[in-house]
C-alpha cells in the first residue's frame, strides 16, 4: 500500500486482474500493444476501474508539479563517462524545470540503500544505467517511472530504454582490425555481469567468426588498469602464437593492456595493436594515442532525460540507438610479418 494511505496500488490491480505488475504498468501506461493481449489489457483496465486505482505517477501530476526531481543511478563514478551522462541529463532537466540527483550505486553493482526516507515522495522518476540495475530494488518506491540506459530493451524493467549502438561500435573495431590483416585476436573483456558487455562479446565473436582463419581468445579482467595489466600479461605470456591485436571493452582496460605489452618488451602498434571503447580523456593521454570508439556520453544523458520526460507526460519516447564512431589513432597498424 502507498505510504500512510489505503489507496489501491498497482500490486492490488495486478492481483485482481491475475497478471503481473509489469503487465499493469504496460496497460495503464498505454504501452501494451504487441506485448499483452487485448483481453488482458481490458481485464487490467476493468480491475483498475473497480478498485478506483489512480496511478501515482508524475505523468498524472505534471501539470500540478510534484517534486520535479529525478534520480540518476550510475555505477560508482570511476570514469568521466558517467559525469558526461549526468551533464547531458541535467541540461535537459534544467530546461524543463527539473533537478537531477546523482546517485552512484555502491561498488558499481549490487543493491543500494534508498537515499531517501521515501523515494516515491521525493522523486518523480529514475534514470538508471544497466550496470547499476541491482540498486533499483530499494529505489523504485511503489511505482516510479523508470528509464533504463545501456540496457536490454527486451528484458528491461523500465518504461523505456535508451541505448548507444554498442554493437555497431564493436563491428567497426573488428572490421578495422580484420581489414588491417589481424587474425589472432585477444578480447580483454570487462568482468562485469551487464547487458552492454554481453553485447560486446557476442558481436565480436560473430564478426571474427565470420572470417576464415581467425582465432579469438577471451580473458576477463576487472575494470581497473592493474587488473587489466595482470590479465593481459598472463594471456600474452601463454604458450603458442601470440595475438597480434588486443580488443578492450573500455579505455581503462586498454591502458592496462599498454602496461602489459611494455612489460613484455613489446611495442604498440609494431608488435601488437590495441583498441579501446569510450574515448575517455585517457585515450589521448597514453602513447601512442588509442584507437577507440567514441561514445557521446552527454547526448546519452540528454536522450535518457528526454525519454523520462516523455514517459512522465504520457508520450512515447523517441526510439533508435545513438550512433557511435570509431576514432583511429596510433595504437593500430597491420600485424608485423613474423
Image (spheres, rainbow, N blue to C red):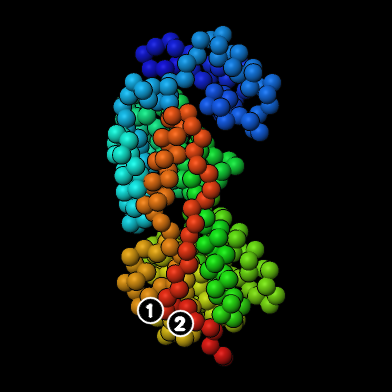
- Quarter of the image with the C terminus is bottom right
Provide residue 54's location: percent of width, then percent of height: 47, 16
Q: Are the residues at dot 1 and dot 2 in contact (C-beta closer than 8 Å)? A: yes
When the figure is inspected, residue 96 is found, relative to residue 181, above or below; the finding is above
Percent coordinates x, y for residue 303 in the rendering: 43, 45
Residue at the location (31% across, 43% down)? 90
Relative to 100, residue 330 above or below: below
Q: For this rendering, which residue is in front, 25 or 336?
A: 25
Q: Nearer the viewer, residue 7 or 263?
A: 7
Label 2 crowding class (10 Å Cα cut-off): few <14, some 14-19, many 20+?
A: some
Which numbered disc covers residue 288? 1
Category of crowding for the residue at label 1, using alpha-carbon neighbours closer than 10 angstroms: few (below 14), some (14–19), many (at least 20): some
Residue named by callout 2: 269
Q: Assign a secondary structure to mark 1.
A: loop
Regarding residue 255, the answer to whether it shows in the image is yes
Q: Secondary structure at mark 2?
A: loop
Q: Quadrant of residue 212?
A: bottom right
Q: Position of residue 181 (x, y in %)?
A: 59, 81
Specify whether residue 257 is in view. Answer: no
- Could you tell me residue 27's position as x and y percent? 58, 25
Amino acid at each position: 500500500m502507498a505510504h500512510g494511505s489505503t489507496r489501491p496500488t498497482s500490486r492490488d490491480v495486478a492481483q485482481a486482474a491475475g497478471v503481473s505488475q509489469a503487465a499493469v504498468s504496460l496497460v495503464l501506461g498505454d504501452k501494451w500493444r504487441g506485448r499483452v493481449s487485448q483481453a488482458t489489457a481490458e481485464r487490467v483496465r476493468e480491475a483498475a476501474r473497480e478498485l478506483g486505482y489512480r496511478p501515482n505517477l508524475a505523468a498524472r501530476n505534471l501539470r500540478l508539479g510534484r517534486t520535479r526531481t529525478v534520480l540518476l543511478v550510475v555505477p560508482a563514478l570511476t570514469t568521466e563517462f558517467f559525469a558526461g551522462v549526468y551533464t547531458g541529463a541535467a541540461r535537459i532537466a534544467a530546461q524543463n524545470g527539473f533537478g537531477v540527483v546523482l546517485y552512484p550505486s555502491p561498488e558499481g553493482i549490487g543493491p543500494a540503500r534508498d537515499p531517501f526516507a521515501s523515494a516515491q515522495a521525493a522523486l518523480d522518476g529514475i534514470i538508471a544505467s544497466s550496470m547499476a540495475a541491482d540498486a533499483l530494488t530499494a529505489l523504485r518506491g511503489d511505482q516510479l517511472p523508470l528509464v533504463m540506459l545501456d540496457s536490454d530493451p527486451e528484458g528491461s524493467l523500465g518504461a523505456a530504454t535508451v541505448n548507444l549502438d554498442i554493437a555497431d561500435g564493436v563491428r567497426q573495431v573488428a572490421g578495422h582490425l580484420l581489414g588491417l590483416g589481424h587474425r589472432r585476436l585477444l578480447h580483454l573483456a570487462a568482468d562485469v555481469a551487464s547487458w552492454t558487455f554481453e553485447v560486446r562479446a557476442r558481436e565480436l565473436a560473430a564478426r571474427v567468426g565470420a572470417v576464415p582463419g581467425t582465432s579469438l581468445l577471451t580473458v576477463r579482467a576487472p575494470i581497473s588498469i592493474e587488473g587489466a595489466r595482470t590479465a593481459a600479461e598472463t594471456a600474452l605470456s601463454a604458450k603458442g602464437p601470440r595475438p597480434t591485436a588486443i580488443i578492450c571493452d573500455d579505455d581503462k582496460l586498454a591502458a592496462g593492456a599498454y602496461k602489459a605489452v611494455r612489460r613484455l618488451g613489446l611495442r604498440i602498434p609494431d608488435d601488437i595493436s590495441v583498441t579501446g571503447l569510450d574515448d575517455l580523456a585517457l585515450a589521448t593521454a597514453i602513447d601512442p594515442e588509442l584507437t577507440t570508439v567514441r561514445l557521446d556520453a552527454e547526448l546519452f544523458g540528454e536522450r535518457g532525460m528526454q525519454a523520462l520526460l516523455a514517459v512522465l507526460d504520457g508520450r512515447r519516447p523517441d526510439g533508435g540507438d545513438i550512433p557511435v564512431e570509431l576514432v583511429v589513432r596510433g595504437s593500430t597498424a597491420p600485424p608485423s610479418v613474423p
